[in-house]
Amino acid sequence: MARILTYEEKDTWIHRLSGVTKLIFFLLWTLISMLSYDTRVLLSMVLGSLIIYKMSKIKWRQVGTVFMFILFFLVFNLIAIFVFSPYEGVNIYGSRTDIMHLFGGYFLTKEQLFYEFNVMIKYVTIVPAVFMFIITTNPSEFAASLNRIGVSYNVGYAVAITLRYIPDVQDDFTKIKHAQEARGIEMSGKASLFGRIKNIASIIFPLIFTSMERIDVVSNAMELRGFGKHKKRTWYAGKKLKRADYIVIGVIVVITVAALIITFHDGNRFYNPFMK
Amino acid sequence: MKTSFGVKEVVAVGIGAALFVALTQVQIPLGIPNTYLQPRAALLAFLAAVFGPIVGAAVGLIGHAVGDMFFYGSAWWSWVFPEAVFGIIVGVFAKKYAIKEGGFGKKEIIHFNVVQIIANAAAWILVAPVLDIIIYKEPVNKVFLQGVAAWLGNVVIIAILGTLLAVGYSKVGAKSSSLTKED
């Protein structure tokens, strides 16, 4: 159950930034990468996120396995796009430049390659930002940040509880799994499909039912301490915004506006190098 | 329809989403590449059916977004929002299933499954592919095929695991009607 990104305490200027700043940065960064299909914008974002990645001193061992997994998924997706729609790029860019004939009705075109390249960097831009966000933000501080940008503290608390209990639930899962294996339930892929569902069920049932009890216990404890009594609450882990925070927020807002203007000034989301 | 959002709901969302995230990696391969039955879908259906639409939507949103980010390093937004759509539709009828009250019988099982099939269709055949096209501009036939595959997988796993969970919990957690009248 490993291979998960986790927060690690360090002392870089990115770690010192408030969670609010990093959250705003992350949301705007994601927004641009969702909206834009402009190659120039996306490429500068890839460059920018590599710089951020370098500066936050994240180690490769922290993100390596996850990154390889993303890469695998990305390649699979790119191949799927080509198989299903080899002329998507031709439609989007409105021209067709054949490179070679592959087989049957499949021609490799420059437009398709360019389109798939754009799909690829669109996903790649967001990855270092996610790494940076998860690995440099303390989960408790994150809940405080959500509240700070105007999200109800109930929601902030729900997210905090999620982050707090993921390791616990994973622990429970492993324990139950070992217990069931000790009782002789086959967990490997040898069982039939229905058998596999049954085996998974033998873990999931106890897991979910104990979690339902845990929900009762935790909510009773919170209720006893008066959670939800007032409209506002203070946060132990919240950080005040400092000068560096305002600078970063200012910069990301400017970047967002600029990126959107560059993307949409010619009326659509695509940068078209094929149009003369 | 349950719309109150008290302490219990906050905790249910938190721990429910944590479960959802933990189950992200628990997948049952079907033998077709990249296609799995996802037990976490059954968990979401179960939680929405017990706690109602708001908890359902929030567990779907938070669970999927956090799970994607932790395990895959990015959030695939066009597949995050449908999860909430699914949670809302299943959760709207929470009162009708009467799971907590111990009344999850034959009629409720059919009701639950009809709703989950429709909710899955709305989420994965309608919302997810449309968002894929709007946000990521992916080929139309590819995203709809993916949508139908996801719909089928989820319907199957929820019909089996989701139903059993609800039946089991309805028996265990039954409070108001755990006594049966002797003839």
Image (cartoon, rainbow, N blue to C red):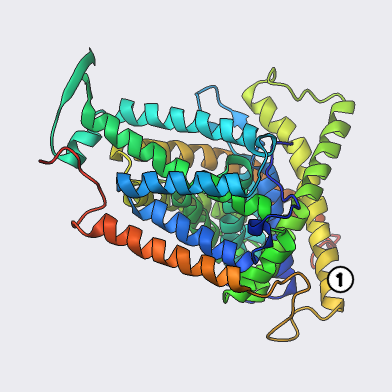
Frontmost residue, A252 versus A121: A252
In the image, residue A226 sits, relative to residue A212, either above or below, namely below
From the viewer's perspective, is B169 left or right of A58? right
Quadrant of the drawing holding the N terminus of chain B: bottom right
Q: Amino acid at mark 1?
A: Ala
Please tell me which residue lies in front, A256 or A244.
A244
Q: Quadrant of the C terminus of chain B?
A: bottom right
Q: Residue furthest bottom?
A: A230
Q: Position of residue A104 (x, y in %)?
A: 22, 14
Query: Height in image: A225 above or below A271?
Result: below
Name the residue beneath numbered marker 1: A221
Chain letter of mark 1 equals A
Residue A241 in the image, given as x and y percentages of width and height: 63, 74
Residue A86 % position (x, y) = 26, 28
**Label 1 residue SS:** helix
Residue at image x 57%, y 63%? A23
Camera-side residue: A255 or A236? A255
Residue A163 horizontal/vertical position (percent): 72, 56
- Taking the spot 40% from the left edge, 40% from the top edge, the residue there is A121
Residue A224 visible to an observer of this rendering:
yes
Quarter where residue B24 is shown: top right
Residue that appears at 60% across and 50% down: A132
Horizontally, residue B29 falls left or right of residue B140, namely right
